[in-house]
Amino acid sequence: EMQRLELDLLHPNLLDLAELRVDKNGLKFLPDQVAMLPSLISLRFRDNLVQRLPDSFTNLSNLKELDMSKNKFHTLPKCVIALTHLTRLRCGNNPIPFSLSAEWIEGGVDSFLRDYILETTGKRIAAMWSSAQT
């Protein structure tokens, strides 16, 4: 039988939490409260079942490292693109149509995300155009 752990992320003692790792826990979602951790610098939830992130993740203005690899994302969440202070990102091994590196993306994460959006938008338009022509 699987045990359940509940954590009060709004507890005053957690306001200074800088790193949160919840890898390999079978998580289907991350609670909104994670976005209320003002000191969070590193968030890792690798190898879970997460499909989406709450829009409130844009509040994680101090976040520098994010590992969301090996989950169930079908698109790169918009809130991740808005995290302009990221210096390390790992988001591969998700069922995202246009493959992402399984390795850490380090330095220039914001330009990588911008380029990825432009590239995938072009591929989606091309795919729609070719299917409309047949």
Image (tube, rainbow, N blue to C red):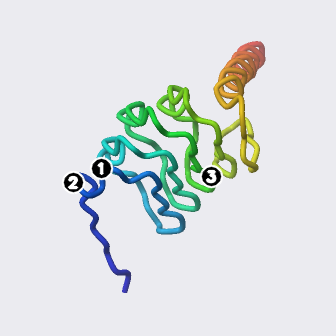
Mark 2–mark 1 distance (CA, rounded to whole Å): 6 Å
Residue 129 drawn at (x, y percent): 73, 14
Mark 3–mark 2 distance (CA, rounded to whole Å): 29 Å
Residue 62 drawn at (x, y percent): 46, 36
Q: Secondary structure at mark 1?
A: loop
Q: Is residue 73 above or below residue 24?
A: above
Count residues near mark 1 (Cα–Cα under 10 Å), then give few for <14, some for 14-19, many for 20+: some
Q: Quadrant of residue 36?
A: top left
Mark closer to the observer (3, 2): 2
Of callouts 1 and 3, the N-terminal one: 1
Is 46 in front, or is 72? 46
Mark closer to the observer (1, 3): 1
Q: Is residue 24 above or below residue 62?
A: below
Pointer 2 with pointer 1, Cβ within 8 A: yes
Residue 29 drawn at (x, y percent): 40, 53
Residue 47 left/right relative to 125: left
Q: Which residue is mark 2?
A: 12
Which labelled disc corresponds to residue 114?
Answer: none
Instruction: Residue type at mark 1: give it.
Output: Leu
Quarter of the figure with the N terminus: bottom left
Q: Which residue is mark 3?
A: 69
Q: Which residue is mark 1?
A: 15
Residue 86 drawn at (x, y percent): 58, 35
